[in-house]
Amino acid sequence: MEAYKKDFIEFMVDAQVLRFGNFTLKSGRKSPFFMNAGAYTKGSQLLRLGEFYARAIHDHYGLDFDVLFGPAYKGIPLAVATVMAISRLYGRDVRYCCNRKEVKDHGDKGILLGSPLRDGDRVLIIEDVTTSGASIAETYPIIRAQADVDVIGLIVSLNRMEVGREGRLSALDEIREKYGFPAHAIVSMKEVTEHLSRPGENGKALIDAKLRKALDAYYAEYGVH
């Protein structure tokens, strides 16, 4: 596993973005872990987060694209932080674009903020996490309605590795199959479990035998087999 992935896993835990316990997800599933990108609230955290996304984007997609699109609302700070990081790390200026939840009918009108989308743009979508693919089902038509663009893919921070809406493939694989573009994550839950099951500096592992059993049971029911 690349060093930046290990750093990112520890970063999520330290920021309390990734937590372990008993949680009820929006989907109604009972989960032993929860990921909430809204817990990134400090400038220093957003700076580092943007860098992690930038490195993953560079690894999976390169930098041959024009616009990073962040769906409202959580995708907005992700897109802004990441285009700044791409500029600083790689010297490449990528435009950012986001959507509003409601169309604005005065001043800076329309459903978009940031850069307009133009015919021929290569667009990469950025999100925090995708569990069922529902957000892409909302976002993709908005993007396609604005201009004749090429959506080159999706990048998320964590691949939960659960079955999507149809119960056959993972949410990311369903997106690949339905929309025809790749979907990648900075890290997967397999990588998270692997890394956090190893003893830390204090000799203890964050994911102990009890938690590992709960994770195994969860994936036996909801994981991709």
Image (tube, rainbow, N blue to C red):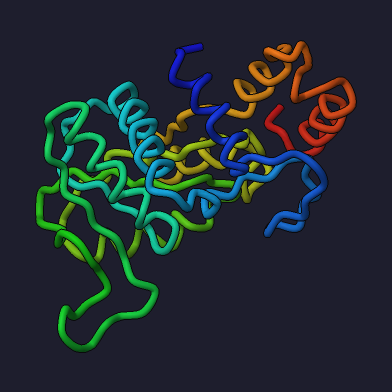
- Name the side, left or right, on which 148 lies relative to 168: left
Q: Where 45 sits versus 105, above or below?
A: above
Answer whether residue 174 is visible to the viewer in this image: yes
Q: Position of residue 6 (x, y in %)?
A: 53, 19
- Name the side, left or right, on which 215 lies relative to 7: right
Residue beneath the point at 56% across and 36% down: 12
Q: Position of residue 116 (x, y in %)?
A: 14, 62
Residue beneath the point at 71% across and 54% down: 25
Q: Position of residue 7 (x, y in %)?
A: 50, 22
Q: Nearer the viewer, residue 160 or 52?
A: 52
Residue beneath the point at 34% across and 54% down: 70
Q: Where 41 sits versus 201, above or below?
A: below
Image quadrant where residue 206 sits: top right
Most distant residue in the bottom direction: 106
Q: Nearer the viewer, residue 127 or 167?
A: 127
Q: Nearer the viewer, residue 93 or 64?
A: 93
Q: Where 30 sits versus 47, above or below?
A: below
Residue beneath the point at 26% across and 47% down: 68
